[in-house]
Image (tube, rainbow, N blue to C red):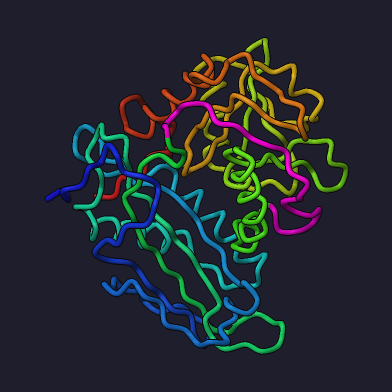
Amino acid sequence: MVKNIDWGNLGFGYMKTDYRYVSCYKNGKWDEGQLVKDENVVINESACVLQYAQTCFEGLKAYKTKENKVVCFRPDMNAKRMIESAKRLEMPTFSEERFLDAIKKVVNANFDWVPPYGSGASLYIRPYMFGSDAIMGVKPATEYQFRIFVSPVGPYFKGGVKPITLMIPDFDRAAPRGTGHVKAGLNYAMSLHAIVNAHNHGYNENLYLDSRTRTKIEETGSANIIFVTKNNEVVTPKSDTILPSITRRSLMYVAEHYLGLKATEREIYLEELQDYKECALCGTAAVLSPVGKISDHGKDILFPSGMEKPGEITQKLYDTLRSIQMCEIDAPEGWIFEVN
């Protein structure tokens, strides 16, 4: 039975559900894994994750379709990205096959928490891995936990698809040849001071520049970014320090193959922004959030799409991707993963 929740007014926050999945790595192998009810994690005070931030995570969602099926959107891509994150952080990998099986188990165990079709809410799924045994010297852990919890959520940005504002900070998100391309917890810790600073100045998010030259657009603290030119070309930044967003890659495919638009990934310079007509953040949590204004140290870049509603192309991209995710239109092969 679906939980009695005000789904339409649900925010983006943690809500305890019934079960979570846990698998432990010890003596060179993962155990079989199990579903547990206890949401608390008990680890040693000198656990590697606490001392040296050896942790990575993923984020994806489960949706209920009109036919009452529960599906996930391209979870195999999350599994592959988590494998790359684990390799970069010298952690054992959790196989794609086991990752997908764990997703099925934990979502089915929390089936009553999946928001109803048409509510605008979804079941957020958070797989994560961390070094759990006691480490004093700077070195990888020898024991790890892979866990998944789920929580019903509403929109990431309050106000739904109303355009948001960004500021260009004096901080860098990632260094060249660093860890910007993997979903490591430490990357997000680096952004916390900057996001608080943005909020204190009245902005929703930061738009980071490349740390080498500070002339090229990269991404925000919580999402990738796309732009629409005056000729309706969809462009997105290309950089080795950008997290490869599954949503962004999907949107670029949608732009080209569903909407018939030119879609290009390339270096985008800050000075170009004034020539674009639309801008939006894209990611699992935000899906697609239009941007109305970017502030560059007192100089405002205002997009013609305005601050009242998404631009025409942004809206089409959003509607099409959401329709694919909700199984309302045919999806490319392999994009929809049925859970129940």
Residue displayed at 80% across by 56% down? 177
Name the residue at the left extreme.
1
Residue displayed at 58% across by 28% down? 291
Q: Which residues are magenta?
A: 159-180
Quadrant in the picture for residue 207: top right
Residue 174 vertical position relative to residue 31 in the rendered view, above or below: above
Residue 218 x, y percent position in the rendering: 72, 40
Magenta part, dominant SS: loop
Left or right, residue 108 beside residue 22 = left
Residue 69 x, y percent position in the rendering: 23, 41
Viewer-nearest residue: 287 or 68: 287
Residue 18 x, y percent position in the rendering: 24, 64
Residue displayed at 60% across by 82% down? 141
Quadrant in the picture for residue 319: top left
Q: Is residue 173 magenta?
A: yes
Left or right, residue 71 beside residue 263 = left
Residue 142 vertical position relative to residue 14 in the rendered view, above or below: below
Residue 236 x, y percent position in the rendering: 67, 31
Viewer-nearest residue: 145 or 116: 116
